[in-house]
């Protein structure tokens, strides 16, 4: 019996040694250098770059300016938006954004741009609504199809025919912010730059107010509505968390507001209505859409130039009927201007 056990032990040890030897051979084979098809890798990389470039061009045209709207009538737009189904599947979770060192000059500039965007886009929205706007901007910073800085995202297209955030190209910056809403917007911006993640919007990179219907609302994945804003993510792999792999560029630039530019735009528009032209140097590249409408929670407003009086506030219907909006305007007119980092 003892001899049998010893023989069995010997056989077992031999089999174990053989297995270890085989594993060693396999490890050596796996660790040995293999030829790499550099041509295939380069071709795949080039294809990815081209795909991102095409996507970037397409996304740069997605705006809520007049020519992009399918429906601009508030009542019918709300009904039409309600017919668009919400996308199925998980929203996806973004990692906290902490790329910009607090206290740095880049942080101060980014905080100013982000605060502005939250204020002019969602001043009277809920805190979650403000956070959703901030999250969309930071999501864009990390997507390779968008600029890789906070101010770059916010001011994308502000000197072109199509701007991404309408307040940067319609003269709204001439208006003095309201104290309370500005403070709230700044707090939300600081929290977002400090790593706060608004999970309700997931990987959303687009949103629009429910009183308009842009054509791209039918091409993206509708994920959530918060207040008057409906949020969307890019379809397929482009909207998944792993696609948000771009790094912050390392610098921030905040363009200066130039009222003369908008005065030139107004002059060009007036001449165009009369069938006349204006020298290219005298007109700005941006064409304001004076027919679009603002909801009573959108305090960006519209600015028009009146001869001899300078910039005057012009709020088109239906917002004139809002008592809450008029109260907000009174507060803006009577309150002291806050520090706006501009």
Image (tube, rainbow, N blue to C red):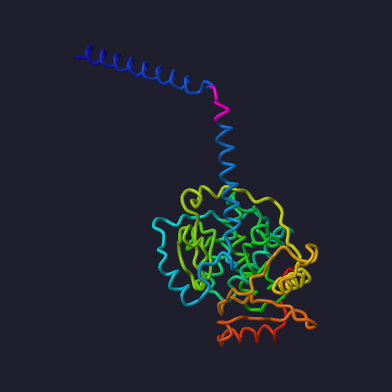
- Residue 336, located in which quarter of the rendered image? bottom right
Please name whichever residue, 69 or 257, is drawn nearer the observer in this view of the structure.
69
Rendered location of residue 206, percent (x, y): 54, 61
Quadrant in which the C terminus is drawn? bottom right
For the point 77% across and 70% down, which residue is it?
Answer: 264
Q: Is residue 67 left or right of residue 15?
A: right
Q: Is 270 rendered above or below residue 245?
A: below
| Residue found at the very far front of the displayed protein | 275
Rendered location of residue 299, percent (x, y): 62, 77
Q: Is 50 rendered above or below residue 241?
A: above
Please indicate, yes or no, whether residue 182 appears anywhere in the rendered image: yes
Please name whichever residue, 3 or 299, is drawn nearer the observer in this view of the structure.
299
Please indicate, yes or no, whether residue 97 appears anywhere in the rendered image: no
Rendered location of residue 233, percent (x, y): 49, 57
For the point 48% across and 55% down, which residue is it?
Answer: 93
Q: Is 109 rendered above or below residue 271?
A: above
Quadrant in which the N terminus is drawn? top left
- Residue 137, located in which quarter of the rendered image? bottom right
Rendered location of residue 39, percent (x, y): 57, 28
Which span is picked out in magenta? 35-40
Please name whichever residue, 216 or 236, is drawn nearer the observer in this view of the structure.
216
Q: Is residue 270 left or right of residue 227?
A: right
| Residue found at the very far left of the displayed protein | 1
For residue 37: magenta?
yes
For residue 266: magenta?
no
Please name whichever residue, 309 or 25, is drawn nearer the observer in this view of the structure.
309
Q: How many marks?
A: 0
């Amino acid at each position: 019996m003892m001899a049998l056990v010893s023989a069995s032990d010997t056989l077992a040890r031999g089999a174990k040694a053989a297995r270890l030897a085989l594993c060693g051979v396999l490890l050596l084979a796996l660790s040995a250098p293999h030829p790499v098809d550099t041509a295939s890798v380069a071709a795949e990389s080039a294809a990815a770059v081209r795909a991102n470039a095409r996507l970037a061009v397409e996304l740069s045209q997605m705006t809520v300016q007049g020519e992009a709207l399918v429906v601009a009538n508030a009542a019918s737009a709300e009904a039409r938006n309600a017919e668009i189904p919400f996308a199925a599947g998980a929203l996806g979770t973004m990692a906290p954004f902490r790329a910009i060192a607090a206290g740095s000059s880049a942080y101060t500039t980014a905080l100013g741009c982000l605060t502005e965007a939250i204020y002019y886009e969602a001043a009277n929205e809920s805190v979650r609504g403000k956070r959703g706007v901030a999250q969309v901007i930071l999501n864009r910073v990390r997507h390779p199809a968008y600029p890789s800085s906070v101010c770059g995202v916010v001011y994308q297209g502000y000197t072109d025919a199509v701007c991404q955030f309408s307040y940067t190209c319609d003269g709204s910056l001439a208006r003095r912010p309201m104290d309370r809403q500005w403070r709230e917007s700044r707090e939300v911006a600081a929290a977002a730059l400090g790593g706060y993640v608004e999970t309700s919007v997931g990987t959303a990179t687009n949103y629009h107010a429910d009183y308009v219907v842009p054509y791209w609302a039918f091409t993206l994945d509708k994920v959530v509505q918060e207040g008057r804003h409906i949020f969307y993510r890019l379809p397929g792999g482009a909207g998944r968390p792993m696609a948000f792999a771009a790094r912050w560029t390392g610098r921030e630039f905040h363009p200066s507001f130039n009222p003369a530019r908008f005065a030139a735009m107004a002059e060009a528009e007036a001449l165009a209505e009369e069938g006349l032209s204006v020298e290219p140097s005298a007109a700005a590249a941006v064409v304001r859409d004076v027919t679009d409408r603002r909801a009573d929670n959108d305090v960006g407003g519209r600015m028009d130039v009146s001869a001899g009086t300078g910039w005057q506030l012009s709020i088109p219907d239906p917002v004139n009927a809002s008592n809450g909006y008029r109260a907000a305007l009174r507060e803006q007119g009577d309150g002291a201007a806050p520090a706006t980092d501009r």
